Amino acid sequence: MHLPKPWLLLALTAPLSFLPGMKVSGAEIRINGIPLDKREELVAKVRPRLDFIKQREASSWRADDAAFFFKRLLIRAGHADAEVDWKLPGGNVIEINARPGVRYKYGEIKANRMGPLTGEQLRQYFLQPLIETELVAADKAPFIEEYSLKGASNVQNFLKSQGYWQASVSVANEKYDRVSKQVNIQLNLSARAKFKLARPSFNGMPAEDLAEILPDVQPFIGETADSGNMTKINSIVENYYREKGYHFAQIFVDAKHVGGVTTLIFEINRGIRYTVDDIVVRGNKYTKTKRIRRYFDGLKDIHFDRNAADKALSNLLASGAFRSATLSPVPVPGGMLDLQIDVTEAEAKALKSYIGLGSFEGGILGMSYTDLNLRGNLLKLNARGEYSGRGFLGELSITEPHFAGEPIQLTLRGFLLQRLYDGYDKSEAGVEASLLAKYHDHYSSRLFLGTSSVGTSTSSLTEQELGPDGYLNTRLGFEQTVDFRDDPLLPSSGFYARGILEFGSITGGESTTYLKTVFDGSYRFVLGEKNFFVTRFSTGAIKPADVEKLPIDLRLFSGGSDSVRSFEQRQLGPRSLSDDPLGGQAYWNASLEYIRPIKDPIKGVLFFDMGQVYSDVGDWGSFSDPSYAIGAGIRVDLPIGAVRLEYGHNLNQREGEPNGTFHFTIGTSF
């Protein structure tokens, strides 16, 4: 609770009956010493109790109750010396006279010895109970005496959670500073030594279970007996029985801390080992039952594995067709379980339109239609049309999210694309089939096979510079992604990497084959609270069987908002006789960014980029002749991604190159 200071110096008197929305029945309560604007705020906090008093005649004990309520509120606002008394002036009136006195805040939090704590940690854990209960900011935390004891206890509990099980923390002194209106706290702190984990005791655990569990527990023996390690050991035991089918196993754990050693004592009654008999689905009205059951069919007729069941339920929810879904194991005779799946269907269809703007694309106008539960089959249909200053894209795709009874996405996609690039135009129509598997939360693999008919035209490039202008491109590829970022749209920390290996062929008037590889990687980290850093590296190469027959649209381009920002999009590297970008057979770029919040959601960014595009794949890996850029920008974090306005300055400008380039984009780079 936080009450601003100005009213503390005022002493206004007004009948409570004049406050808006207050109905006087029985006793009338008048409050003195608190201004009108803050008086109503106080009254709101004790309104139910005051209403009880006001429904009855004024009396000494009712007046005493009202005074008690208001004094308690003032104390909890930081007025440790608050005084409140009452009068019965007659006429069925209760008069409350408040003298709030000085409002104190918590000042310095110190200890006779810090032990393993920093000053910041000591203050954080001391004030935590007050901040979380009273919902106040740390720098405005009011002094409330009862929270001094709670704060000391919280610091002690934190030390114990770090393995200091003999730690003790108490309040030694509370010093009032009437000038600064702060109360400085002195703590007595004794952490002593950290405890180590001994081998746990497993009472009631069969020998065969112990033999399987001990190898997983062994690495923790001798480690610090902190809450993290103790929780991990407990999870190992619980997960073992969850996975083995002992769903109703009773597992109790206690800890003994003696002589610097902590021993976890487990009491285990594993009960019956269950096998899954049937899958029962309830609540679906539109979705076909068999399409839901297939997510769980792999669990039937085997010992119940709760972790696998939870994973299957998570995959079902990931379809987006359900607002909620729960799984309940129901015992049936014969040591069997039925898995009862209760679902609530969501609105699966959505029609959306959108607009955008980018320095490369220009204006963007698009519309999409999505059905996450096509004809009740849990198939995802997506149709999209998008028009921009660079051309048009139309695509239609259908995704089976649970292909072949596994959590693998099968997507069939058809598309029509028309693009206007500097130097040439392109039209492309094609189809693609892909399989996407996600596993271990941070990893995904995609296998794709596609073919498309491509036509290119130019008014400025030579035939040799353009390459084949009409061909069929067939490709088979594999993509691997590793993503440990904390947020895919607005990441602030974590590692990301993506690699693609593609084999393709060009058939038409001229034919050839090629092998292409691309790698993107980034790492984000934070120093302190407001210093964010991003490092990126990207590279790629394409090796054709016949260089002369490689179309311009399959060459690799760089430059732009996600590479070397002193160049416009696709403008880095070799140029044609007409000064249009030609792309190349290899490229690389690297960058370092420093990001600092200005005022939420606005951030400032400083960056350094380098990179190059090479005509010959033989130059790949040489990192020769790089272009350098340095720059700054502003970013605004929105739910759809970051809005980025950046300027990159060319540090080693060559003849014909720009001095620098502005970029405006929406979205987060990899």
Image: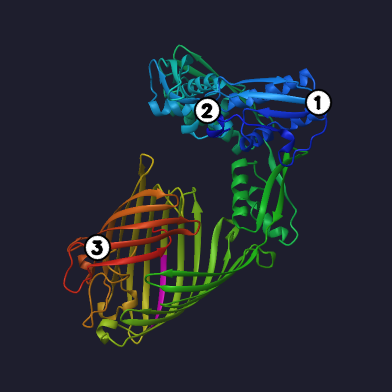
Few, some or many residues within 10 Å of mark 3 (<14, 14–19, 20+): many
SS at badge 2 = loop
Tell which of 17 and 535 is nearer to you. Answer: 17
From the viewer's perspective, is residue 58 above or below residue 305?
above
Label located before the other in sequence (2 or 1): 1
Given the image, on which type of amino acid does mark 2 rest? Pro
Is any part of residue 202 visible from this angle?
A: no
SS at badge 1 = loop
Q: Position of residue 369 (x, y in %)?
A: 59, 70
The answer to which quarter of the image holds residue 647 is bottom left
Between marks 3 and 1 in the image, the one whose residue lies nearer the viewer:
1
Residue contact between numbered discs 3 and 1, judged by CB atoms under 8 Å: no
State the residue position of label 3. 649
State the residue position of label 2. 142
Tell which of 119 and 319 is nearer to you. Answer: 119
From the viewer's perspective, is residue 472 above or below residue 650?
below
Question: Which region shows up in magenta?
Answer: 471-477
